[in-house]
Image (spheres, grey):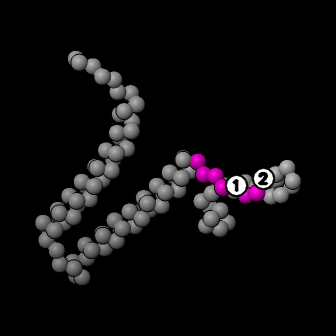
Amino acid sequence: MTKFEKCYKIYVIKDDLGEINMKNEETKRERFVRVAESRTNKILNMVQLLGNCSNASTYEYSTEDIEKIFNAIDFELKEAKKKFNKVDSKKGSKFTLN
């Protein structure tokens, strides 16, 4: 299976004259799964590479450096998660004055 075929469902359709038309369709769900899996795997790989920086015989770092790095990562993770939670919270929320 080629990279292109992995990304799209390919439909072969014959029109009234018997000519073959190729139609590429990808649902929103399929696109989400494809993009989210790819991006998540890239992030996980980068986190693993960051862990390689912990080798004290190769690198010199302070406790403050580590705190700054992981605070920045934690902050961005929380921001990304908020974006997903906004979608869920809007669906069932109702306005009240109480």
Q: Was residue 24 drawn as part of the magenta stretch in this picture? A: yes
Numbered mark located on residue 79 in the image:
none
Q: Residues within 10 Å of mark 2 (few under 14, many from 20)?
A: few
**Mark 2 and 1 residues: CB-CB less than 8 Å, in contact?**
yes
Residue 44: x %, y % from top left: 39, 62
Query: Would you name the residue on which mark 2 appears?
Result: 13
Residue 20 shown left or right of residue 27 in the figure = right
Residue 62: x %, y % from top left: 13, 71
Q: Was residue 9 drawn as part of the magenta stretch in this picture? A: no
Residue 21: x %, y % from top left: 76, 57
Q: What is the magenta segment's predominant secondary structure?
A: strand
- Which of marks 1 and 2 precedes in the sequence? 2
Where does the C terminus fall, quadrant-wise? top left
Numbered mark located on residue 23 in the image:
1
Residues in magenta? 21-27
Indicate the amino acid at tag 1: Lys
Residue 13 shown left or right of residue 73 in the figure = right
Quadrant hosting residue 53:
bottom left
Quadrant hosting residue 9:
bottom right
Question: Residue reaching furthest top?
Answer: 98
